[in-house]
């Protein structure tokens, strides 16, 4: 009985630790289906279903679809769980295809050592057609925004914080065919994605505000902003 209790207790502690610190390895991602009918929000390493057990951590997310003229449509997402235990927050509609999607998630204050921080997530979907519409490339909702634009050399990714370019913003760019690229923005807030492939790029940016305060009764020493873009270049017209 004692051994069995200790083992159960240890497993319980492991589960609590996993749930407590999972946010440090997981990010909010959003994506629109190819036909524009389904909008999904994921909490994991990329724009695809991941552990359904962790979806409740981002249930407070605000999600919006965007129409071709750039208007925002608030979305009421529902939890979708697959047979393998992975899942997402999703919604499907029968109207005109959605052209884009964005999300904001206030994760709250987390304690890591002696330096508690306020964690905020942002997500955006972009594809080949989005790159032709400047209005859809830019956001009115995301404090840390990644703005993609097509150039002769590839795709420029600009980091904007409250509308201003951010120098020194940390980027991680990856797809399922290559190792992650770690990049840092220049003085204009840009990094360049070259040698484009017809894949889905997972783009993540991090910016830390060295700003202390209190949120929901919890004190923090800094604010960590993580913004993602699911950049789908699989279409033939890229």
Image (spheres, helix red, strand yellow):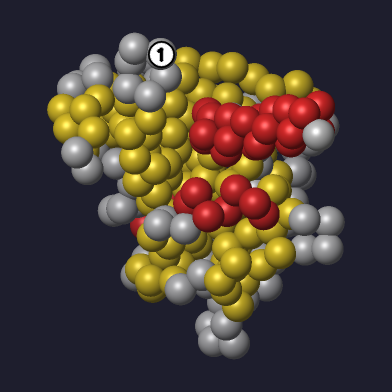
Q: Residue 97 falls in which quadrant of the image? A: bottom right
Residue plotted at (63% across, 42% down): 44
- Of residues 19 and 35, the one nearer the viewer is 19
Q: Examine the rendering and report whether any part of residue 102 can be seen.
A: no
Local crowd size for mark 1, using a 10 Å CA cut-off: few (<14), some (14–19), many (≥20): few
- Of residues 225 and 237, the one nearer the viewer is 225
Q: How far from the left and from the top, in percent, is residue 115?
A: 33, 15
Residue plotted at (38% across, 73% down): 73
- Is residue 21 placed above or below 238 in the rendered structure? above
Residue plotted at (43% across, 26% down): 206
Q: How far from the left and from the top, in percent, is residue 192?
A: 54, 25
**Residue with the most extreme left position:** 213
In the drawing, does residue 41 fall left or right of residue 69? Answer: right
- Is residue 162 placed above or below 172 in the rendered structure? below
> Which residue in the protein does label 1 denote?
113
Residue plotted at (16% across, 28% down): 213
Q: Examine the rendering and report whether any part of residue 169 can be seen.
A: yes
In the drawing, does residue 146 fall left or right of residue 172? Answer: left
Q: How far from the left and from the top, in percent, is residue 21?
A: 54, 30
């Amino acid at each position: 009985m004692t051994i069995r209790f200790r083992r159960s207790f240890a497993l319980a502690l492991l589960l609590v630790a996993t749930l407590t610190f999972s946010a440090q390895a997981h990010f909010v991602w959003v994506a629109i289906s190819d036909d524009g009918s389904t909008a999904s929000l994921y909490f994991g390493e990329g724009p695809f279903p991941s552990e359904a057990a962790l979806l409740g951590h981002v249930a407070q997310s605000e999600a919006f679809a965007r129409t071709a003229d750039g208007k925002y449509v608030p979305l009421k997402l529902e939890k979708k769980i697959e047979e393998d235990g992975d899942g997402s927050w999703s919604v499907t509609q029968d109207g005109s295809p959605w052209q884009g999607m964005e999300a904001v998630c206030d994760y709250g204050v987390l304690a890591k050592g002696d330096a508690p921080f306020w964690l905020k997530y942002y997500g955006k979907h972009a594809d080949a057609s989005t790159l032709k519409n400047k209005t859809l490339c830019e956001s009115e909702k995301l404090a840390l925004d990644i703005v993609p634009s097509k150039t002769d050399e590839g795709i420029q990714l600009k980091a904007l914080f409250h509308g201003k370019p951010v120098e020194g913003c940390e980027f991680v760019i990856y797809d399922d065919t290559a190792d992650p690229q770690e990049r840092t923005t220049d003085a204009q807030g840009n990094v360049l994605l070259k040698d484009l492939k017809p894949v889905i790029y997972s783009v993540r940016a991090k910016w830390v505000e060295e700003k202390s305060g209190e949120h929901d009764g919890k004190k923090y020493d800094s604010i960590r902003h993580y913004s993602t873009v699911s950049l789908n270049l699989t279409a033939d017209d890229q």
